[in-house]
Image (cartoon, rainbow, N blue to C red):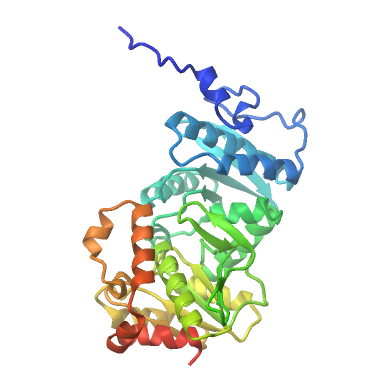
Amino acid sequence: MHAPRNPLSASRRVNSLPKIYEQKKWPRHSIRYNVQHDQMSSMDEIRGEYKELTDLPANADGYAKRQRGHAFERLLYKLLLLDELEPRTGYRPTGEQIDGSLYFDGRMYLLEAKWHADPLPASTLYQFKGKVDGKLVGSIGIFISMSGYAKDAVDALVLGKGLNIILFDQRDMEAAIIRGVGFKSILKLKLRKAAEEGAIYFPTESELVTADRTSTVAIDHLRYDRATDRVFEAQTLEPATADLLIVCEGDIDRVVIATLAERILASNGSGRSIKILTAMGKAIIPRVANALWNTVSSTSKVLIVVDGDDDPTGTDMMLANGLEFTDWIAAIPNPSIETWLGIDLEDVRRKGVRHRLDQAELAAKMLDIDELRARDVEFAHFYGAILGT
Protein backbone atom coordinates (compact mmCIF):
# COMPACT_ATOMS: atom_id res chain seq x y z
CA MET A 1 0.00 0.00 0.00
CA HIS A 2 1.48 3.30 -1.08
CA ALA A 3 1.70 6.27 1.24
CA PRO A 4 -0.66 9.15 0.33
CA ARG A 5 0.83 11.76 -1.97
CA ASN A 6 1.86 15.07 -0.58
CA PRO A 7 -1.04 17.49 -1.15
CA LEU A 8 1.51 19.96 -2.49
CA SER A 9 1.79 18.46 -5.96
CA ALA A 10 4.93 18.56 -8.07
CA SER A 11 3.36 21.03 -10.46
CA ARG A 12 2.47 23.41 -7.65
CA ARG A 13 5.95 23.10 -6.17
CA VAL A 14 7.55 23.99 -9.49
CA ASN A 15 5.33 27.06 -9.74
CA SER A 16 6.64 28.25 -6.38
CA LEU A 17 10.24 28.26 -7.64
CA PRO A 18 12.00 30.98 -9.64
CA LYS A 19 11.38 31.00 -13.39
CA ILE A 20 14.65 29.26 -14.12
CA TYR A 21 13.14 26.05 -12.74
CA GLU A 22 10.11 26.32 -15.02
CA GLN A 23 12.00 25.87 -18.25
CA LYS A 24 11.44 23.09 -20.73
CA LYS A 25 10.26 19.85 -19.12
CA TRP A 26 13.45 17.88 -19.42
CA PRO A 27 13.11 14.30 -18.15
CA ARG A 28 14.56 13.98 -14.66
CA HIS A 29 16.83 11.14 -15.71
CA SER A 30 18.33 13.09 -18.60
CA ILE A 31 19.36 16.65 -19.30
CA ARG A 32 20.54 16.31 -22.87
CA TYR A 33 20.48 19.11 -25.37
CA ASN A 34 20.25 19.04 -29.14
CA VAL A 35 22.95 21.49 -30.18
CA GLN A 36 21.49 21.94 -33.64
CA HIS A 37 18.17 23.14 -32.27
CA ASP A 38 19.29 24.93 -29.12
CA GLN A 39 19.38 28.69 -29.48
CA MET A 40 22.65 30.25 -28.35
CA SER A 41 22.18 32.13 -25.08
CA SER A 42 23.88 35.45 -24.45
CA MET A 43 26.03 36.07 -21.38
CA ASP A 44 23.37 38.46 -20.07
CA GLU A 45 20.76 35.70 -20.24
CA ILE A 46 23.09 33.23 -18.55
CA ARG A 47 23.90 35.80 -15.87
CA GLY A 48 20.19 36.36 -15.17
CA GLU A 49 19.54 32.63 -14.83
CA TYR A 50 22.54 32.21 -12.57
CA LYS A 51 21.35 34.96 -10.22
CA GLU A 52 17.98 33.24 -9.92
CA LEU A 53 19.72 30.01 -8.95
CA THR A 54 21.81 31.70 -6.26
CA ASP A 55 18.67 33.37 -4.88
CA LEU A 56 17.22 30.01 -3.77
CA PRO A 57 16.80 30.25 0.03
CA ALA A 58 19.12 28.13 2.14
CA ASN A 59 16.08 26.58 3.85
CA ALA A 60 14.44 25.49 0.58
CA ASP A 61 13.23 21.88 0.51
CA GLY A 62 15.10 19.01 -1.09
CA TYR A 63 12.97 19.05 -4.22
CA ALA A 64 13.80 22.69 -4.92
CA LYS A 65 17.50 22.05 -4.39
CA ARG A 66 17.46 19.06 -6.74
CA GLN A 67 15.74 21.20 -9.36
CA ARG A 68 18.42 23.84 -8.88
CA GLY A 69 21.07 21.19 -9.53
CA HIS A 70 19.40 20.20 -12.80
CA ALA A 71 18.98 23.85 -13.79
CA PHE A 72 22.64 24.54 -13.01
CA GLU A 73 23.73 21.74 -15.33
CA ARG A 74 21.58 23.22 -18.10
CA LEU A 75 23.05 26.67 -17.44
CA LEU A 76 26.56 25.23 -17.49
CA TYR A 77 25.86 23.70 -20.87
CA LYS A 78 24.83 27.12 -22.21
CA LEU A 79 27.97 28.73 -20.77
CA LEU A 80 30.23 26.15 -22.40
CA LEU A 81 28.35 26.44 -25.67
CA LEU A 82 28.84 30.21 -25.63
CA ASP A 83 32.60 29.64 -25.25
CA GLU A 84 32.56 27.20 -28.20
CA LEU A 85 33.71 24.31 -26.00
CA GLU A 86 31.48 21.76 -27.75
CA PRO A 87 29.75 20.54 -24.57
CA ARG A 88 27.92 17.28 -24.08
CA THR A 89 25.88 16.73 -20.94
CA GLY A 90 24.22 13.89 -19.10
CA TYR A 91 25.45 10.65 -20.65
CA ARG A 92 25.73 7.27 -18.99
CA PRO A 93 28.48 4.84 -19.99
CA THR A 94 28.24 1.33 -18.60
CA GLY A 95 28.03 1.33 -14.81
CA GLU A 96 28.52 5.05 -14.15
CA GLN A 97 27.08 8.52 -14.62
CA ILE A 98 29.07 11.28 -16.31
CA ASP A 99 27.69 14.80 -15.95
CA GLY A 100 29.24 15.92 -19.20
CA SER A 101 32.28 16.64 -21.29
CA LEU A 102 33.80 19.47 -23.30
CA TYR A 103 36.41 19.89 -26.01
CA PHE A 104 39.20 22.42 -25.61
CA ASP A 105 42.47 22.90 -27.44
CA GLY A 106 42.50 19.45 -29.01
CA ARG A 107 41.59 17.52 -25.85
CA MET A 108 38.40 16.09 -24.34
CA TYR A 109 37.65 16.88 -20.69
CA LEU A 110 35.19 15.00 -18.48
CA LEU A 111 32.94 17.21 -16.38
CA GLU A 112 31.15 16.81 -13.06
CA ALA A 113 29.19 19.56 -11.29
CA LYS A 114 27.71 19.51 -7.77
CA TRP A 115 25.68 22.06 -5.83
CA HIS A 116 25.46 20.75 -2.27
CA ALA A 117 24.98 22.49 1.06
CA ASP A 118 28.37 21.57 2.54
CA PRO A 119 31.94 21.42 1.22
CA LEU A 120 32.62 18.17 -0.60
CA PRO A 121 34.90 15.58 1.04
CA ALA A 122 37.89 13.87 -0.53
CA SER A 123 35.83 10.70 -1.09
CA THR A 124 33.64 12.50 -3.64
CA LEU A 125 36.68 13.68 -5.57
CA TYR A 126 38.16 10.17 -5.49
CA GLN A 127 34.98 8.79 -7.03
CA PHE A 128 35.27 11.23 -9.92
CA LYS A 129 39.00 10.56 -10.25
CA GLY A 130 38.18 6.88 -10.62
CA LYS A 131 35.94 7.71 -13.57
CA VAL A 132 38.67 9.78 -15.20
CA ASP A 133 41.32 7.11 -14.57
CA GLY A 134 39.17 4.60 -16.42
CA LYS A 135 39.15 6.61 -19.66
CA LEU A 136 41.70 7.20 -22.39
CA VAL A 137 45.24 7.77 -21.11
CA GLY A 138 45.77 11.49 -20.61
CA SER A 139 42.11 12.25 -19.91
CA ILE A 140 41.52 15.21 -17.59
CA GLY A 141 38.51 15.82 -15.37
CA ILE A 142 36.94 19.14 -14.42
CA PHE A 143 35.09 19.09 -11.09
CA ILE A 144 32.84 22.00 -10.11
CA SER A 145 31.62 22.23 -6.51
CA MET A 146 29.41 25.21 -5.74
CA SER A 147 29.80 24.47 -2.02
CA GLY A 148 33.58 24.28 -2.17
CA TYR A 149 35.79 21.49 -0.85
CA ALA A 150 36.64 20.16 2.58
CA LYS A 151 39.92 21.45 3.96
CA ASP A 152 41.78 18.18 3.43
CA ALA A 153 40.15 17.20 0.13
CA VAL A 154 42.64 18.93 -2.16
CA ASP A 155 45.61 17.65 -0.15
CA ALA A 156 44.30 14.10 -0.51
CA LEU A 157 44.42 14.37 -4.30
CA VAL A 158 47.74 16.18 -4.48
CA LEU A 159 49.48 13.65 -2.24
CA GLY A 160 48.25 10.79 -4.43
CA LYS A 161 49.61 9.73 -7.78
CA GLY A 162 48.63 11.14 -11.14
CA LEU A 163 47.12 14.64 -11.08
CA ASN A 164 44.34 14.59 -13.66
CA ILE A 165 41.59 16.73 -12.11
CA ILE A 166 41.10 20.52 -12.15
CA LEU A 167 38.89 22.00 -9.43
CA PHE A 168 36.42 24.88 -9.77
CA ASP A 169 34.22 26.41 -7.08
CA GLN A 170 31.52 29.08 -6.83
CA ARG A 171 33.98 31.95 -6.99
CA ASP A 172 35.30 30.63 -10.29
CA MET A 173 31.78 30.35 -11.67
CA GLU A 174 30.93 33.88 -10.56
CA ALA A 175 34.08 35.18 -12.23
CA ALA A 176 33.06 33.36 -15.41
CA ILE A 177 29.39 34.44 -15.33
CA ILE A 178 28.79 37.53 -13.20
CA ARG A 179 31.84 39.39 -14.47
CA GLY A 180 31.68 37.76 -17.89
CA VAL A 181 35.25 36.44 -17.92
CA GLY A 182 33.99 33.22 -19.45
CA PHE A 183 34.67 29.60 -18.58
CA LYS A 184 37.42 29.17 -21.15
CA SER A 185 39.65 31.92 -19.74
CA ILE A 186 39.48 30.51 -16.22
CA LEU A 187 40.09 26.99 -17.48
CA LYS A 188 43.24 28.14 -19.30
CA LEU A 189 44.58 29.77 -16.12
CA LYS A 190 43.87 26.69 -14.02
CA LEU A 191 45.37 24.30 -16.55
CA ARG A 192 48.55 26.35 -16.71
CA LYS A 193 48.95 26.47 -12.93
CA ALA A 194 48.23 22.75 -12.65
CA ALA A 195 50.78 21.94 -15.37
CA GLU A 196 53.50 24.31 -14.10
CA GLU A 197 53.07 23.99 -10.34
CA GLY A 198 50.79 21.02 -9.70
CA ALA A 199 48.19 23.40 -8.24
CA ILE A 200 44.94 21.62 -9.16
CA TYR A 201 42.97 24.21 -7.21
CA PHE A 202 44.26 27.68 -8.07
CA PRO A 203 41.82 30.39 -6.93
CA THR A 204 40.83 32.97 -9.50
CA GLU A 205 39.66 35.40 -6.83
CA SER A 206 41.02 36.73 -3.58
CA GLU A 207 39.73 38.81 -0.71
CA LEU A 208 41.09 42.35 -0.59
CA VAL A 209 41.31 43.88 2.89
CA THR A 210 42.05 47.56 3.56
CA ALA A 211 41.28 50.08 6.28
CA ASP A 212 41.31 53.88 6.16
CA ARG A 213 42.24 56.31 8.93
CA THR A 214 38.66 56.59 10.10
CA SER A 215 38.80 52.90 11.05
CA THR A 216 36.23 52.09 8.37
CA VAL A 217 37.07 48.88 6.55
CA ALA A 218 36.69 49.03 2.78
CA ILE A 219 36.42 45.96 0.54
CA ASP A 220 36.37 46.98 -3.10
CA HIS A 221 34.62 45.14 -5.96
CA LEU A 222 32.00 43.76 -3.60
CA ARG A 223 30.46 40.31 -3.85
CA TYR A 224 28.22 38.62 -1.31
CA ASP A 225 29.20 35.12 -0.15
CA ARG A 226 26.17 33.22 1.11
CA ALA A 227 28.27 30.64 2.93
CA THR A 228 29.71 33.19 5.35
CA ASP A 229 27.45 36.24 5.03
CA ARG A 230 30.55 38.22 4.11
CA VAL A 231 31.32 40.56 1.26
CA PHE A 232 34.28 39.57 -0.87
CA GLU A 233 36.26 41.06 -3.68
CA ALA A 234 34.91 39.90 -7.04
CA GLN A 235 38.01 40.50 -9.11
CA THR A 236 40.49 38.06 -10.54
CA LEU A 237 44.07 38.19 -9.35
CA GLU A 238 45.90 40.76 -11.44
CA PRO A 239 49.48 42.06 -11.59
CA ALA A 240 48.52 45.24 -9.72
CA THR A 241 47.91 43.38 -6.48
CA ALA A 242 48.46 44.50 -2.91
CA ASP A 243 51.07 45.36 -0.30
CA LEU A 244 50.86 41.86 1.18
CA LEU A 245 49.69 38.56 -0.29
CA ILE A 246 48.48 35.94 2.19
CA VAL A 247 48.00 32.26 1.40
CA CYS A 248 46.11 30.17 3.95
CA GLU A 249 44.66 26.67 4.25
CA GLY A 250 40.88 26.92 4.38
CA ASP A 251 37.80 29.08 4.65
CA ILE A 252 37.84 29.34 8.44
CA ASP A 253 41.45 30.53 8.26
CA ARG A 254 40.44 33.08 5.60
CA VAL A 255 37.63 34.47 7.76
CA VAL A 256 39.85 34.72 10.84
CA ILE A 257 42.74 36.31 8.93
CA ALA A 258 40.49 38.85 7.21
CA THR A 259 38.80 39.84 10.47
CA LEU A 260 42.08 40.20 12.36
CA ALA A 261 43.76 42.03 9.48
CA GLU A 262 40.90 44.53 9.28
CA ARG A 263 41.19 45.23 13.01
CA ILE A 264 44.99 45.57 12.94
CA LEU A 265 44.99 47.91 9.93
CA ALA A 266 42.16 50.05 11.31
CA SER A 267 43.58 50.38 14.83
CA ASN A 268 46.94 51.46 13.43
CA GLY A 269 45.51 53.83 10.82
CA SER A 270 47.33 51.89 8.12
CA GLY A 271 46.64 52.41 4.43
CA ARG A 272 48.11 49.04 3.43
CA SER A 273 46.12 46.59 1.34
CA ILE A 274 46.14 42.83 1.69
CA LYS A 275 44.95 40.02 -0.55
CA ILE A 276 44.06 36.64 0.89
CA LEU A 277 43.94 33.44 -1.14
CA THR A 278 42.68 30.08 0.09
CA ALA A 279 44.64 26.99 -0.98
CA MET A 280 42.10 24.51 0.46
CA GLY A 281 44.78 22.31 1.98
CA LYS A 282 48.12 22.34 3.75
CA ALA A 283 50.32 20.28 1.45
CA ILE A 284 49.20 22.27 -1.59
CA ILE A 285 50.06 25.66 -0.07
CA PRO A 286 53.59 25.79 -1.60
CA ARG A 287 52.17 24.98 -5.04
CA VAL A 288 49.51 27.69 -4.81
CA ALA A 289 52.04 30.19 -3.46
CA ASN A 290 54.49 29.39 -6.27
CA ALA A 291 51.75 29.75 -8.86
CA LEU A 292 50.69 33.05 -7.27
CA TRP A 293 54.24 34.40 -7.28
CA ASN A 294 54.69 33.47 -10.92
CA THR A 295 51.37 35.11 -11.84
CA VAL A 296 51.82 38.57 -10.36
CA SER A 297 54.44 41.11 -11.32
CA SER A 298 54.70 42.69 -7.92
CA THR A 299 57.15 43.37 -5.12
CA SER A 300 54.55 42.24 -2.59
CA LYS A 301 55.69 40.02 0.24
CA VAL A 302 53.93 36.68 0.67
CA LEU A 303 52.76 35.65 4.13
CA ILE A 304 51.93 31.97 4.61
CA VAL A 305 49.53 31.27 7.48
CA VAL A 306 49.43 27.51 8.09
CA ASP A 307 48.58 25.27 11.04
CA GLY A 308 51.49 23.65 12.87
CA ASP A 309 49.52 20.46 13.62
CA ASP A 310 51.79 19.81 16.63
CA ASP A 311 54.83 19.82 14.34
CA PRO A 312 55.64 23.48 13.63
CA THR A 313 59.26 22.66 12.78
CA GLY A 314 58.20 20.09 10.21
CA THR A 315 55.65 22.52 8.82
CA ASP A 316 58.31 25.20 8.41
CA MET A 317 60.57 22.70 6.63
CA MET A 318 57.72 21.74 4.32
CA LEU A 319 57.37 25.38 3.30
CA ALA A 320 61.12 25.92 2.93
CA ASN A 321 61.47 22.85 0.71
CA GLY A 322 58.41 23.61 -1.40
CA LEU A 323 58.53 27.37 -2.02
CA GLU A 324 60.51 28.42 -5.07
CA PHE A 325 60.98 32.09 -4.14
CA THR A 326 62.61 33.78 -1.17
CA ASP A 327 60.43 36.79 -0.40
CA TRP A 328 58.08 35.02 2.02
CA ILE A 329 57.46 34.83 5.72
CA ALA A 330 55.33 32.42 7.73
CA ALA A 331 53.05 32.49 10.75
CA ILE A 332 52.48 28.97 12.08
CA PRO A 333 49.84 28.85 14.86
CA ASN A 334 50.16 25.56 16.73
CA PRO A 335 48.30 23.29 16.60
CA SER A 336 45.90 25.47 14.56
CA ILE A 337 44.65 29.01 14.01
CA GLU A 338 41.80 28.30 16.45
CA THR A 339 44.49 28.35 19.17
CA TRP A 340 44.79 32.11 18.67
CA LEU A 341 41.06 32.45 19.28
CA GLY A 342 40.85 30.26 22.37
CA ILE A 343 38.37 27.92 20.66
CA ASP A 344 38.12 24.26 21.64
CA LEU A 345 39.08 22.33 18.49
CA GLU A 346 37.10 19.18 19.29
CA ASP A 347 33.97 21.18 20.04
CA VAL A 348 34.35 23.19 16.82
CA ARG A 349 34.78 20.08 14.67
CA ARG A 350 31.49 18.65 15.89
CA LYS A 351 29.58 21.66 14.57
CA GLY A 352 28.42 22.41 11.04
CA VAL A 353 30.47 24.46 8.60
CA ARG A 354 28.36 27.58 8.97
CA HIS A 355 28.47 27.41 12.76
CA ARG A 356 32.26 27.03 12.71
CA LEU A 357 32.65 30.04 10.44
CA ASP A 358 30.35 32.19 12.58
CA GLN A 359 32.05 31.13 15.81
CA ALA A 360 35.51 31.79 14.42
CA GLU A 361 34.58 35.23 13.09
CA LEU A 362 32.94 36.25 16.38
CA ALA A 363 35.97 35.07 18.36
CA ALA A 364 38.29 37.03 16.03
CA LYS A 365 36.22 40.17 16.58
CA MET A 366 36.35 39.78 20.38
CA LEU A 367 40.02 38.79 20.60
CA ASP A 368 42.37 40.89 22.75
CA ILE A 369 44.97 41.46 20.03
CA ASP A 370 47.55 43.18 22.23
CA GLU A 371 47.45 40.43 24.85
CA LEU A 372 47.81 37.69 22.22
CA ARG A 373 50.62 39.55 20.52
CA ALA A 374 52.55 39.73 23.79
CA ARG A 375 52.35 36.02 24.56
CA ASP A 376 52.31 34.29 21.14
CA VAL A 377 55.40 34.61 18.94
CA GLU A 378 53.66 33.36 15.79
CA PHE A 379 50.84 35.87 16.17
CA ALA A 380 53.46 38.60 16.67
CA HIS A 381 54.93 37.54 13.31
CA PHE A 382 51.46 37.76 11.77
CA TYR A 383 50.84 41.19 13.33
CA GLY A 384 54.14 42.56 12.03
CA ALA A 385 53.55 41.19 8.55
CA ILE A 386 50.12 42.84 8.36
CA LEU A 387 51.66 46.23 9.12
CA GLY A 388 54.83 45.61 7.11
CA THR A 389 57.14 46.02 10.11
In the image, what residue occupies the spot 57% across and 23% down? 15
- Residue at the far top: name it: 1
Instruction: Please indicate, yes or no, whether residue 323 appears anywhere in the rendered image.
Output: no
Residue 376 rendering spot, x and y as whole percentages: 29, 85
In this rendering, would 10 be left or right of 235? left
Residue 211, position as x, y percentages in the image: 55, 77
Residue 44, image x and y in percent?
A: 74, 45
Name the residue nearer the viewer: 269 or 153. 269
Q: Residue at x 39, y 56 (%)?
A: 150
Using the rendered view, name the quadrant where residue 271 is placed. bottom right
47 or 374: nearer the viewer: 374
Q: Position of residue 382 (x, y in %)?
A: 41, 83
Q: In this view, does 135 lie above or below 285?
A: above
Q: In which quarter of the image is residue 25?
A: top right
Task: Examine the image and state in which quarter residue 316 appears.
Answer: bottom left
Q: Is residue 81 left or right of residue 5?
A: right
- When the figure is inspected, residue 325 is found, relative to residue 81, above or below; the finding is below
Of residues 150 and 19, which is closer to you in this image?
Answer: 19
Direction from residue 72 to residue 41 in the image, left or right: right
